Amino acid sequence: MSTSASPATTELITGLLIDRFDVDPAAVRPAARMTDLLVDSLMVVEMAITLKDELGVVVSEDTLRELTFAEFAARVDAHRAA
């Protein structure tokens, strides 16, 4: 699986992290672990729900805990394209 997401998907997820989860924009980098951006379990759950509700993309909480931002964005991009 590619770890490259479209700019639109990257921008969308960055916006969610900053606007909904108050993540510092400087922290949103390709190599950042999603668990470093979503610092507690509730944030992880809320992100999974937000993706399902707003984009129709189902991503497990375990996936959110395992991936970097770039890997996560690529995964969301692949689901949106399917």
Image: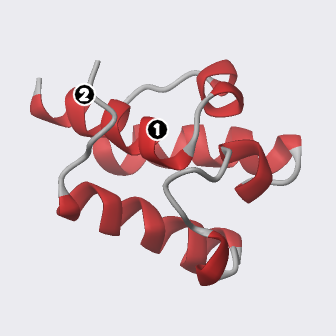
Judge depth for marks 2 and 1 and give the one in front: 1
Looking at the image, residue 11 sits to the left or right of residue 36; the answer is left
Residue 12 x %, y %: 34, 65
Label 1 SS: helix
Q: Quadrant of the C terminus?
A: top left
* Residue assigned mark 2: 79
Which quadrant would residue 48 be assigned to in this image?
A: top right
Q: Amino acid at mark 2?
A: His
Which quadrant would residue 19 be assigned to in this image?
A: bottom right
Looking at the image, residue 62 sits to the left or right of residue 30; the answer is right
Residue 66 x %, y %: 67, 25
Furthest-front residue in this view: 31
Looking at the image, residue 51 sits to the left or right of residue 43; the answer is left
Residue 28 x %, y %: 57, 67
Residue 47 x %, y %: 60, 47
Label 2 SS: helix
Mark 2 neighbour class, 10 Å CA radius: few under 14, some 14 to 19, many 20 or more: some
Mark 1 neighbour class, 10 Å CA radius: few under 14, some 14 to 19, many 20 or more: many
Using the image, tell me which numbered label, if any, was put on residue 36.
none
Above or below 3: residue 60: above
Q: Quadrant of the N terminus?
A: top left
Using the image, tell me which numbered label, if any, was put on residue 72.
1
Q: Amino acid at mark 1?
A: Phe
Labels 2 and 1: the sequence-earlier one: 1
- Closest to the observer: 37 or 54? 37
